[in-house]
Image (spheres, helix red, strand yellow):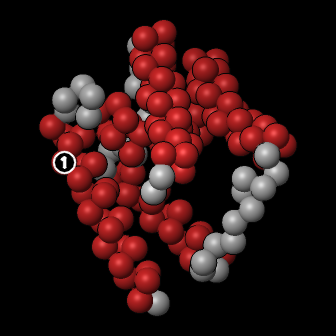
Amino acid sequence: MDLMSSMPPLAGGILIGLAASIMLFFNGRITGVSGLIGMSLTKITRANDWRYLFIAGLILGSVLLNFVNPTFYDYQLPFGFGKAIVAGLLVGFGTRLGRGCTSGHGVCGLPRLSKRSLVVTLTFMGVAIITRFIMKQF
């Protein structure tokens, strides 16, 4: 991997960290996306307005990126749509089981030196490696 090919992931990581820091500094909340989505879907109140805006920003940011760079999402899944649906449901189940997602634990919990976030993040990563190995076999 050369320096230029490592720049987009590095820039993405910096932007994710910056967004999480801004959210904590200005809103006093961690950026746990599964929690944001879960709370916004279970209780429709004015107190959730900031959650709706955050989720809209995620979606609109993706749409804007596709508008600016149409080839960015030019990618074919190496497996069928059905497997993608099952994978998404399993991820949702795992985030509830782990009481948070990778953004909540990995991006926000680890910098706060949370032992629970360390265990959960290591579990996420370990299961991801095992799942990738199994998926390569089928």
Q: Position of residue 96 (x, y in %)?
A: 38, 50
Figure label count: 1
The answer to which of 82 and 127 lies nearer the viewer is 127
Instruction: From the image, tell me which residue sits under label 1.
Output: 119
User: Is 2 left, or right, of 85 in this rendering?
Assistant: left
Q: Residue furthest top?
A: 26
Asked if residue 97 is positioned above or below residue 25 in the image, the reply reads below
Whether residue 52 appears in this view of the structure is: no
User: Is 66 left, or right, of 34 in this rendering?
Assistant: right
Q: Residue furthest front?
A: 2
Q: Position of residue 39 (x, y in %)?
A: 51, 34
Q: Amino acid at mark 1?
A: Val
**Residue shown at 48%/46% (left/top)?**
3
Whether residue 108 appears in this view of the structure is: yes
**Residue shown at 53%/63% (left/top)?**
88
Quadrant for the N terminus, please.
bottom left
- Based on the displayed image, in which of its 4 quarters is residue 20 positioned? top left
User: Is 134 left, or right, of 45 in this rendering?
Assistant: left
